[in-house]
Amino acid sequence: MENHQLQTASGDIQAREFRTSWFRKLTKIREFTILLVIVVLVVVMAIMTPSFLSVDNIVTTILSIVMTAIVSVGMTVALVSGGFDLSVGSVMSMAGVVTGSLALNGMNIWLAAIFGLVASVCSGIVTGLFIGKVKINPFIMTLGMQGVIQGVAYVVTQGAPLSVTGVSNSFLFLGQGNILGIPVLIWILAVIVVVSDIILRRAVSARKVYYIGSNESAAFLSGIRVSRVKVWIYIFTALLAGISGILTLSRFSVAAPTAGQGMELQAIAACIIGGASLSGGEGTVLGALLGSVLVGIVNDALVLLNVSVYWQSLVTGFVLIAAVTLDVLAHRKKAS
């Protein structure tokens, strides 16, 4: 009888230890931790403001994070490589402005959108070549490109938003339509996230990005063409920013030179919150998505709590500083 009790007690202890070990391993996964924070925040907001969980508010909140999430996917790849891109907001604005301007001058809206994407890709090529080939620091290069591209958007519009009317309904469907009761924008985001996540996790060529971010010199010595990979990274980042700008035009029918203002801050904050590191070599697309969701929920909470919209940028800045601080402390802990 005693042996049976001892065996039972021993089994309970082992089961408890297994559950504890399993939970600890799970909490070490950055995405799981962010998901827990999101759930807690949602519960708190649901208690404070019942309208938070209304269908209209949920849809509005999700739509508000679509552009940030799309840009964050590209920003994640740049951060993983050990760089970043401060020009994504300007590229987003330029893509919408180029598309809208050409459409207003009689060009087919779809053809105009292609030109908008081409302009975005060209900016990515220039950025990638100067960073990869000329070895200019990403901060200096992308900051300079931010000013140049933003200037192009202002020159084209003379600083005034362009109201794009009378365009194809199929184009407006991208930003305003629904499929199976779900906004098309959400479907587009889902496709971009899933495809990008699979590529970044599975594709052998995409693993080079992690190698470069972890140790660029070792990656070069192992035969990886670092400069070429960097060019493709910034092309990808600019392309997603351009797509985001065109989708913004489709959603609001307005091309504004300030449409992407502050997007780089939100994207970097979302990526860092999602587990990407400024030191490079770390980051996932899923983490960037969850980071974008968290930033979006925080912004929505401020609105529902009647906090001035001018505080949103302040809060995002504090969130970014906190995320970077945690990242630095985590790396110091690993190093020690």
Image (tube, rainbow, N blue to C red):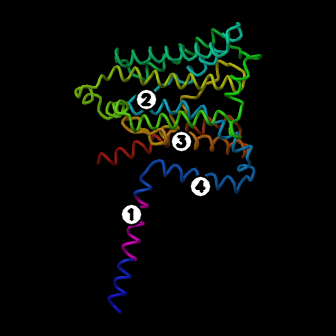
* Residue 5 image offset from top left, x and y in percent: 37, 87
> Of 56 and 28, which appears nearest the observer?
56
Q: Are marks 4 and 1 in contact (CB under 8 Å)?
A: no
Residue 98 located within the stretch drawn in magenta: no
Report, in whole angstroms, how far the alpha carbon at label 1 lies from the one at label 3: 26 Å
Circle number at residue 291: 3
* Residue 272 image offset from top left, x and y in percent: 47, 39
Callout 1 secondary element: helix
The residue most toward the front is 180
Circle number at residue 40: 4
Which mark is first along the chain, 2 or 3? 2
Label total for image: 4
Amino acid type shown at disc 1: Ser
Report, in whole angstroms, how far the alpha carbon at label 1 lies from the one at label 2: 34 Å
Q: Residues within 10 Å of mark 1 (few under 14, many from 20)?
A: few
* Residue 40 image offset from top left, x and y in percent: 59, 55
* Residue at image point 35% right, 79% down: 10
Which residue position is annotated with label 2? Answer: 78
